Structure formats: structure tokens, C-alpha cells
Image: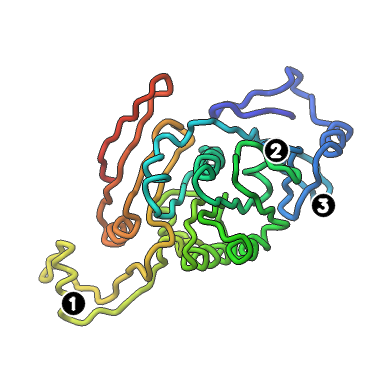
Amino acid sequence: RPCCWMKNERLFLSDDNLRNITRRELDAIISNLGGFGSDNRAGLEKKLHRISGLPDRDGVYVGLTMRVGRWFQGNVAMILDLLLGSDKSILILGEPGSGKSTIIRETVRVMANDYNVCVVDTSNEIGGDGAIPHPCIGLARRMMVPSLDAQSRVMVECVQNHTPHVMCIDEIGRPREVAAAHTVKQRGVRIIASAHGDLRGLVKNREIRGLIGGLEKVTLGDEAAKEEARRNGINNETSGISKMKTQRMADPTFEIIVEVARANFNEWRIIQDSAKAVDDILDGKQYKAQLRIRDPYKTHVILKLIDC
């Protein structure tokens, strides 16, 4: 039964409870698309919308999910100081539908005015379908990704062949892309990217926590274990001292984290020192962050310092 979701509310597109989408209607939509990739995603020429196919076991599409792609000029005003006043790499975290791709699009346009920006465009979601990208990315160039399996290769190829100052990637979600991001960063290219989840969830995610340095377990000596217990407020006499410690393995690929949420598009949480935040999480502590709140009807931004 065809429906849409608006602000977490389901709206049916027909008042007839028995009305289902037909094969002819599905085929009519699919015939106007640019073709589905290996990730079952397709797009429309010079449009930002994404259409995802729902295949059956034989690979025949029996349903479609259509996501409306948006571009809001001025959307990244809350983090312009981080984009233009810093050379640190930024990771945007949030659940599906929280606006990560919309933020990446406007970030690309703003930064391309001053830097050589290249977009590694998975599923053509940032620049839209077709050879000519959507004007939302401004002066940036776009490299298409033929399949999800090729994304890490395209990231490295971008650095080798096109010498960008900044690389923008939507949706890093696999270990090979994590390794490629590390390689790109080591070669002196700044990265702006997005991933699913939040910082605490990222620390627990084995596949992509390399973006924030990765984790390793180490064995402490007697004195070091006692000092660690004292530092964490553990009473040596009443509690056993653990000699095993989980710690961050390396410097994060992304020094700054921006957390966004579907529940409120006008509140972003900024973690300006991801390494310190990860260390605090591993020590069982709260970490420091900024809560930036914008009034959509005014021009000012409210900034609050919070513990998370």
C-alpha cells in the first residue's frame, strides 16, 4: 500500500485500504530512472532524489523507496568557523534521515569557493544522477562510484589523480573505506564525511571505529594498574584491580565530530576534540561538547557547553 513518512508520521497516498501498487506503476517509474546500481539505488538526471529498489529473491523489484533530496543554501552557517577557520577533518554522525547528506551538499558548495574540492559520490546522492552534477555542489568536481565495493579505490584514486585540497564523502560504512580515509588523510588531504550513528555508538562499532583511532587492549604492570585505578576513583582495597585496559590505538582520522538528529534539525552537537572525547568514553567518563542551536526565523546561533 503506497505511503509516505512525514516527521515520523505515516501518510497513506490512497484512502482505499485495499489499494496496492501495481506492476505497471512500478515499471513506469523504473523506466524513467537512470538504472539501478549494485546497491539497488537509482536517481534522476540532475536531481537529488534517491530511489531504492526492493527486490525479491529473483532480483525483480517489487517495491520502491523514494527519498527526497534537498539543498538548503546557508544550512552550514552553524559550523562555518569549523569549515573555513580550521584545517581539521570533520565527521558528521546521525541516524538515517537526520540531514547528513543535505549538510554535506552545502559544505561542498561553500568550501569549493576557496578550495579545490572533490566529491566521491556514492550512489550519486550528493551531486545527483547524470554526467553533469546538480548546481548545489558549486565549483566542486565529482567522481562517481560505480559500486559500493569500489568506493575505497575511488577515494585513493581521487587523491592520486586530481590533487584535491578537500575530499567530501557521503556515508563511510565499511572497513576498506575506513582504511582509505586514513590513507587520504596521511597524504595531506582534508576530509569531510558522514557516517551512521553517534560517537558512543561509533566507539562500539568494530567495522568503522578506525575513523576515531581504533581500539586496542593492553596489559598494565602492577604500578600502572594501581595508578589507573586511582585515576578512575577505584578503591584498591575494596575492588579488584584490572590489569587489562582498552585504549585508543591511534590518532583519529577525524578530529571534529558533528552529531545531528532527526528529532531536531536545528540543534547540532559539536565535539571539537574527538581524541579526548574517545579517551573519556573509554574511561567511563562524560565528554565535553558544544550544543549549537539556531532559530530558523532569526540569524543568531546559541552556543552551550554540555557534558555528554
Q: Residue at x 40, y 40 (%)?
A: 79
Judge left or right: residue 80 versus residue 36. Answer: left
Q: Are there few (<14), some (14-19), or many (20+) residues within 10 Å of tag 1?
A: few
Question: Would you identify the image quadrant in which residue 211 lies?
Answer: bottom left
Judge left or right: residue 35 versus residue 79. Answer: right
Residue kind at label 1, given as amino acid type: Ala
Q: Are there few (<14), some (14-19), or many (20+) residues within 10 Å of tag 3?
A: few
- Return the mark for residue 59: 3
In the structure shown, which secondary structural element does the residue marked by tag 3 occupy? loop
In the structure shown, which secondary structural element does the residue marked by tag 2 occupy? strand
Single out the residue that lies furthest toward the top.
Answer: 15
Q: CA distance from mark 1 to mark 3?
A: 57 Å
Mark closest to the chain's N terminus, 3 or 2: 3
Comparing 167 with 228, the one in front is 167
- Return the mark for residue 186: none
Residue at image mark 2: 65
Comparing 45 with 275, the one in front is 45
Let me know if residue 96 appears in the view: no
